[in-house]
Image (cartoon, grey):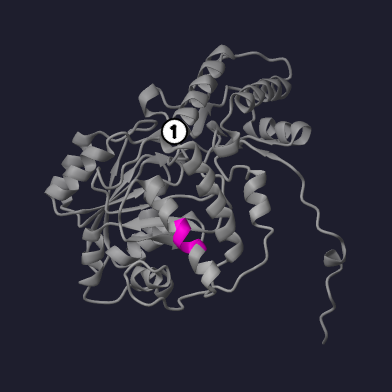
């Protein structure tokens, strides 16, 4: 039997232009898109290694760290979560997951696969975790590793006490892993000052880079723990000692670990260059100001934010309660069909309960905020068919 070439591949590629106002990815700038059109380089070519070194310096800046073990994992944001847990966990280690949405549960699933004894400390629905709640869980479980998402994109909740959690983890000789995929660029994050042991983020969110290459950094303390492991990390691809050699982190000759995408490197390099040129504080301030403008607009429309406390609202992924009698899917479909604008529904515990509006990177502007507010209102009114109510499903 001979399999014929598929007819669909005879048609030219068509990619529509959309405004991505969901929880990520965000739209790439023209600078990033143009960078990715450059010729492909070999993964061990000196020019490629030079770009990797430049990317590494950019990552140190956005994390505010001097960690030598700063690099990228070739994979989506989930690969950062995998790499953090894969390298720190050995069989039987007690791992505590902070839950403010879906990501703590996802990390727990991964940790079990690496042989951990997993426990959870879960916040009330729509709330961040208090230091007291987490301390109580530390006393009960004495974890070796503690995981928390600084910003949970499924609920739009930000965890504001990372600094205190760093101190808590040192007190209990525990390693602190912080997921900053959705929060970096929209909230302050000081890796070294806050005593964070592992941090990773998403290239495709506030950085405005391409998805598929994940910045990550390990503290010296975490690196010492990994080097003293009784067994090798269970996944070769995520072995940070090997990946770090490829990235030139340890002062040893570079090795071949895998074939990195030079195209993704170009895009991330330019996204980081723009981020650094604007300045970390200015980027954070812009994202926060846009979120505040959105929240005021939501209130003026008679809608309600899902996260009740303003200081617990994630600026980059804003969650709005779906009004009673409104089908969120019809609202999202209307926005996409008429305006090619993405407005997302909930994820995990917020499915069918919220709209999620992302204000990240290129889309964190006053103009985009006003545009998405207008479209959201029009789409809701269209889906309600003239029935007006201010009650929410939750």
Q: x, y percentage for residue 350?
A: 49, 36
Q: Which residue is at 49% across, 68% downward?
A: 49
Label 1 neighbour load within 10 Å: few <14, some 14-19, many 20+: many
Residue 342 or 334: which is nearer the viewer?
Answer: 342
Q: Which residues are magenta?
A: 51-55
Query: Taking 14 as reference, is 309 left or right?
Result: left
Q: Is residue 323 left or right of residue 176?
A: right
Residue 140 in view here: no
Residue 243 falls within the magenta-colored stretch: no
Q: How many marks?
A: 1
Q: Is residue 353 left or right of residue 84?
A: right
Main SS, magenta region, reads: helix
**Quarter of the image where the N terminus is located:** bottom right
Residue 14, horizontal then vertical, whole percent: 81, 53
Choose between 128 and 222: the one closer to the eye: 222
Q: What is the secondary structure assignment of the residue under circle 1? A: helix
Which residue bears the numbered disc 1?
284
**Residue at 68% from the left image edge and 15% from the top image edge:** 387
The answer to which quarter of the image holds residue 300 is: top right
In the image, 146 versus 176, the foreground residue is 176
Place of residue 152 in the rendered image (x, y in percent of width and height, measured from the top left): 42, 40
* Vertical relation: 220 (above or below) 7: above
């Amino acid at each position: 039997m001979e399999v014929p070439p598929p007819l669909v591949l005879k048609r030219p590629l068509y990619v529509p232009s959309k405004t991505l106002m969901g929880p990520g990815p965000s739209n790439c700038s023209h600078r990033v898109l143009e960078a990715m059109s450059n010729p492909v380089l070999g993964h061990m070519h000196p020019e490629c290694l030079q770009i990797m070194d430049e990317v590494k310096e950019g990552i140190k800046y956005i994390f505010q760290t001097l960690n030598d073990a700063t690099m990228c994992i070739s994979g989506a944001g989930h690969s950062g979560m995998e790499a953090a847990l894969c390298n720190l966990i050995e069989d039987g280690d007690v791992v505590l997951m902070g839950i403010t949405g879906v990501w703590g549960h996802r990390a727990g699933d991964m940790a079990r696969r690496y042989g951990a004894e997993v426990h959870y400390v879960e916040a009330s629905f729509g709330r961040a975790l208090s230091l007291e709640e987490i301390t109580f869980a530390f006393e009960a479980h004495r974890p070796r590793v503690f995981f928390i998402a600084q910003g949970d994109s499924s609920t739009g909740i930000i965890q504001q006490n990372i600094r205190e959690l760093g101190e808590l983890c040192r007190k209990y000789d525990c390693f602190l892993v912080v997921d900053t995929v959705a929060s970096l660029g929209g909230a302050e994050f000081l890796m070294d000052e806050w005593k964070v042991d592992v941090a990773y983020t998403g290239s495709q969110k506030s950085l405005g880079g391409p998805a598929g290459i994940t910045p990550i950094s390990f503290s010296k303390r975490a690196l010492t723990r990994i080097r003293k492991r009784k067994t090798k990390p269970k996944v070769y691809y995520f072995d940070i000692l090997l990946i770090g050699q490829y990235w030139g982190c340890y002062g040893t000759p570079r090795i071949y670990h895998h074939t990195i995408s030079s195209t993704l490197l170009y895009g991330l390099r330019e996204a980081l260059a723009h981020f650094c040129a604007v300045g970390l504080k200015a980027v954070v301030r812009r994202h926060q100001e846009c979120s505040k403008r959105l929240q005021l607009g939501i209130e003026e429309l008679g809608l309600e934010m899902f996260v009740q406390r303003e200081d617990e609202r994630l600026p980059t992924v804003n969650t709005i309660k779906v009004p009673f009698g409104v089908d969120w899917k019809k609202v999202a479909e209307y926005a996409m069909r008429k305006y090619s604008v993405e407005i997302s529904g909930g994820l995990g515990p917020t499915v069918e309960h919220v709209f999620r509006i992302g204000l990240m990177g290129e889309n964190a502007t006053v103009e985009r905020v006003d545009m998405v507010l207008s479209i959201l209102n029009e789409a809701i009114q269209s889906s309600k068919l003239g029935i007006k109510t201010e009650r929410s499903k939750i």
